Image (cartoon, rainbow, N blue to C red):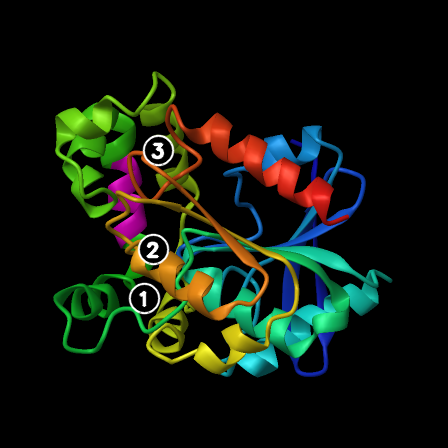
Amino acid sequence: MNRQVSTIHLGEYVLEYSIVGEGPPLLLFHGGHSNCYEEFGYQNLITSGYSVITPSRAGYSQTSPVPELQQACDLYMALLDHLHITKVHVIAVSAGGPTGILFCAQFPTRVASLTLQCAITKPWLSSSDTAYRIGRLIFKPGVEKGTWLILARMNNLLPRLTFRMLLSSFSTLTQAEAYARLDNLAVELFRKMNNRQRSYKGFLIDLEQTQKDYTRELRSIKAHTLIMHSKNDRSVAPSHAEYAEAHIVHSEAFILDAWGHLIWIGKHAAEFDRKQIAFLAENK
């Protein structure tokens, strides 16, 4: 994948971004623990004739840790102006959901369509949740690099065992039920994901932003919206998809019986890909 990575200075802030492919532009807001080097779903978009612009969201990789989401969205809009792009399709993934929602609500004339992929659309982990407390502990700056290094090494040495150990954090299914929905590429794709992930300061920002209520922003979105989710997602419950569909005027939900949160892995991935490309073609 031929990926061009650059940084720009916008006032006191630095914004890192990548561009892959050629054609109509997509602005992709990656999920948690990711950055502008994300890969899930990209090949399908590139071969279908789109270019994918991925800013490392606030606090991830080389992008400045801007705490306010509205201010971060201003930076992403400044990036489009820098690239002389007037209109984009927006794709928001997982913890990038609030960013996509606020961006589309704030800049409606610059958005051709919105796709939410297993995205957070309402308050997620509260400060009293065990997952929230553990996340703040093992993914905080100064610790997260070691956390991901240990996980990557374990995943490289014992990929199948590591996948089985972590499967329940992504899926509500039993192992047998999940494996029936997976294919031979799943374990390797999962291993590669764990080798490229980092939290930097971004995930702690995500934890705060995903506790907020974005109902007003959802209701103000005018762009046609595709809501993609797995009914077996444990990381981000399907109720987030239902909530988005209930509050975005021009929206449709596409819910499949896929294995779990990582909808780009497994036997249903091709069906998600086809639906995504068809939706983009309908809204060009």
- Image mark for residue 142: 1
Q: Which residue does the numbered mark 3 point to in the structure image? A: 190
The alpha-carbon separation of the residues under discs 3 and 1 comes to 24 Å
- Looking at the image, is mark 2 or mark 3 earlier in the sequence? 2
**Element type at mark 1:** loop
Q: Is residue 173 magenta?
A: no
Q: Circles 3 and 1: CB distance less than 8 Å? A: no
Q: Quadrant of residue 145?
A: bottom left
- Image mark for residue 145: 2
Q: Nearer the viewer, residue 147 or 70?
A: 70
The alpha-carbon separation of the residues under discs 2 and 3 comes to 18 Å
Q: Residue at x 39, y 69 (%)?
A: 206
**Element type at mark 2:** helix
Image position, residue 98 (x, y; %): 47, 69
- Which residue occupies the extreme top position in the image? 184
Q: Residue at x 44, y 35 (%)?
A: 264
Q: Which residues are magenta?
A: 147-153
The alpha-carbon separation of the residues under discs 2 and 1 comes to 7 Å
Amino acid type, callout 1 = Gly
Q: Circles 2 and 3: CB distance less than 8 Å? A: no
Image side of residue 194 versus residue 161, left or right: right
